[in-house]
Image (tube, rainbow, N blue to C red):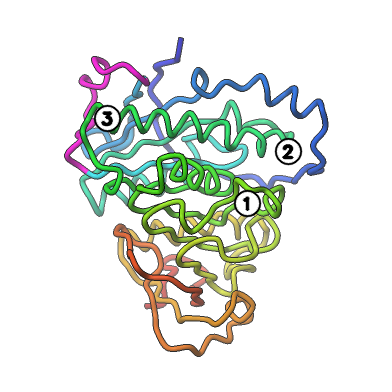
Amino acid sequence: MKQTNRIRIHHTKNNDNVLMDLWTRSSDLDEASTYNPEEMNTYHLFTRENPTLSQPILANNEIWLETTHYNASKRTVVLIHGWLDTITSDFVTLLVQAILQAEDANIIAVDWSPGSGTINYPVAVLNTPISANAVAKFLGWLNNVGGSRLEDYHIIGHGLGAHQAGIVGRILGGWVGYITALDPAFPGWVTNEDRFKPTDGMYTEAIHTNAGLLGYLSPVADSDFYPNGGIDMPGCYSQECDHNRSYHYLAESIKSGGFVGNRCYTYGSAMSGHCFLGGKLRMGGINSKPGQTGIFFLRTNASPPFSRE
């Protein structure tokens, strides 16, 4: 039976992680086979009525759902954390605060730490699409029970969670209105057919902050932003800090806007900062930008406010 513990979110200090050998061994497959996301994943609701203390939602339990603050008439934002994270991570904490400040929405934080919490990174990669199937099934149930529209959903994922967000959208037929990939993971995904794709949602966007190292190098979405060239973020002194800057930038963009990117010809020109094509696009934000496509470059400050706009 699923646990029904509530989770109180708080700021945590992230430690640097070391990627393991990406060679998939038979023992990795064995370890991955022990992860059953339909039983192990948990889903935590945050709203303006409960902005810091989550309400767990139990899949396929409509009576339990009615006891929560979930409101199908409001937009739903889904947060999917990355490797070795949980829903008490800064990724969740910052985005819950930012989103609820900007909008009266349902926020559902997916805790798939039973699948992502292994130090064996290849196993976490294998578990990513397995979790995505369970998340898509959960959202399908929630959508059917509440009568909401997939077009009104926004799925946000970080690292491995970014690819998972794309897979969820793909399983749901590409009808999710807005999907944001925050520095989608690079190791284990170059030849992985499950990686994030532009067609995973009605509008998809990626923010690359550690491109070619922890984060994916090339464009993956309708609109791909490469702040500061996509690597070596001002004020950061580690790959992990670069990787995490993606959700700091998104949180600020949701609260106060800013972050206008210049259009680039290629991601190579974005990484070198030589972008002189006409056209600009605002990065992130609470609302999707259907019909917008391209590669964009911008510069940020080393500390908050990160936007120079």
Q: How far is disc 3 from disc 1 in space, using C-alphas?
A: 31 Å
Chain-order first, disc 3 or disc 1? 3
Three-letter amino acid code at disc 2? Answer: Pro
Which residue is found at the position 67% from the left and 48% from the top? Answer: 192
The x, y position of residue 265, in whole percent, is: 55, 82
Q: Is residue 12 visible?
A: no
The correct choice, above or below, for 113 with respect to 36 in the image is below
Q: Nearer the viewer, residue 247 or 168?
A: 168
- In the picture, residue 62 is in which quadrant? top left
Q: Which mark is residue 122?
A: 2
Which residue is found at the position 26% from the left and 33% from the top? Answer: 50
Task: Identify the secondary structure beneath mark 1.
Answer: loop
Q: How far is disc 1 from disc 2 in space, using C-alphas?
A: 12 Å
Task: Identify the secondary structure beneath mark 2.
Answer: helix
Q: Residues within 10 Å of mark 2 (few under 14, many from 20)?
A: many
Left or right for 118, reference 134 = right
Which residue is found at the position 37% from the left and 30% from the top? Answer: 44
The correct choice, above or below, for 265 with respect to 220 in the image is below
Task: Identify the secondary structure beneath mark 3.
Answer: helix
Chain-order first, disc 3 or disc 2? 2
- Residue on which the image places disc 3: 144
Look at discs 3 and 2 and give the one toward the viewer: 3
Q: Which mark is residue 185?
A: 1
